[in-house]
Image (cartoon, rainbow, N blue to C red):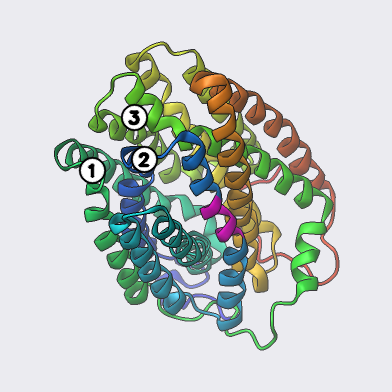
Amino acid sequence: MQGPRLTGATAGVAKPASVVRPAIVMAAFFGSIGAFFPYIAVYYASIDLSVESIGFLFALQAAVSLAAAPLWGALVDQLGTVRGSLLIGALGAALGATLLALAPSGPLIVVGVVVLAVAGSGIIPMLDSRTVDILGADRDRYGRARAWGSAAFIVVSIAVGGLIDRVGARGLFLVYVPGMILAGLAGWALLSGESRAGRRLLRVTRAEVLGLVRRRGLAIFLAGSILLWTSVAAFNTFFSIHLLGLGAPAEVVGFAWALGALVEVPLMLTFHRIVTRVAPERLIVVGVVASAMRAAGFALAPNVPLTLAVAPLGGVGYALFYVGTVTFVSRNAPARLQATAQGIFSGTAFSVGTILGSTIGGQLAGLLGLRGLFGVCAVGAALAAVVIAIGLSTSHATAPPPGLRPGPPLRGRTV
């Protein structure tokens, strides 16, 4: 594999890859997510859906994503480029959201959710794998690109909250749909070029995928990730509704989500430096513990101000767990399977967790109330911290099997 071109002044020293191109695409995409994710449950509630029905729609979207995400990853690994697939996925997500906005009845809502899920399920793994690929051996700097996504999420989520207070919950689609189209076009323009591994001459086989998930440490880590995402999904599905129940306007709902993202930005910007002092495996566990503390805090907080005081823990949890996971997977998956691995350990784990969390969460919310649900989420996240810690330690102690050699060594230490 050919390395970066060197000038005479820097002969022998690889110039770090720029994060500007992926950062722009991240900002466009996660800005769109800032319009959608904090408010979609509010939209469902505004059209008189019950908490059980809302949980079902979240679970349906996740179930479809579960099937579709690995297919997107395998397609990208086969083609050796993400730009076409990313554009199609973003345009499809915009179409699905348009159907949701115009839906007059239950059946069309279901169709919109399915289209959105199929199209959108591969976008984040594609962005992650392409960003890691662009950065090459300097992939610990992934967080610097991702931080711009969180910054855009902050701005858009607050702005859309104000818009919803004025025009109603459907206002979220006025920002999400054009934003997703913009993200697809940005990806097409800025993420061109083949993977460093080039076009795949052989298909990604089932045996290769099974080889990834059957490695003992990675299998345990995947199970722990699913448990965490189950707890997080049950919490996130109903958090906005909980805030509205406490008397908060939609703009405060956006502010609450933005507080978490506000903490993400500096953590992601400095993640590549943090991992030179603290192993990413340890940061992952700290992130899971922070998620457990957030859920416990929301279960106990009696009013909006105290709820907002706990919100920044969400940013700590997401930044450390998600960026840590991308870094960990990129170090442990072979170069040929980077997009597939990110799809499994990020997309698939998230989808399975969302299926379980949304379905179980909807039932528990009806039985225990939202505070009771959040307490259960805290216990689940705490258990996930234990399982993930075991998986990470086991993975470090277990050598990869033949044929699953990871990519080049990265900057930063390991446990």
* Local crowd size for mark 3, using a 10 Å CA cut-off: few (<14), some (14–19), many (≥20): many
Q: Distance between the residues labelled 2 and 1?
A: 10 Å
Residue 311 showing in the rendered view: yes
Q: Say which residue appears at 85% left-offset and 64% top-offset.
A: 401
Contact, mark 3 vs mark 1 (Cβ under 8 Å):
no
Which range of residues does the magenta coloring cover? Answer: 60-66
Q: Earlier in the sequence, mark 2 or mark 1?
A: 2
| Amino acid type, residue under disc 1 in the picture | Val
- Circle 2 residue: 38
Residue 25 vertical position relative to residue 349 in the rendered view, above or below: below
Q: Is the magenta stretch mostly helix, strand or loop?
A: helix
User: Relative to residue 142, is residue 90 drawn left or right?
Assistant: left
- x, y percentage for residue 328? 64, 51
**Residue 160 got which mark?**
1
Quarter of the view holding residue 161: top left
- Circle 3 residue: 256
- Element assignment for label 2: loop
- Residue 62 sits inside the magenta stretch: yes
- x, y percentage for residue 165? 18, 35
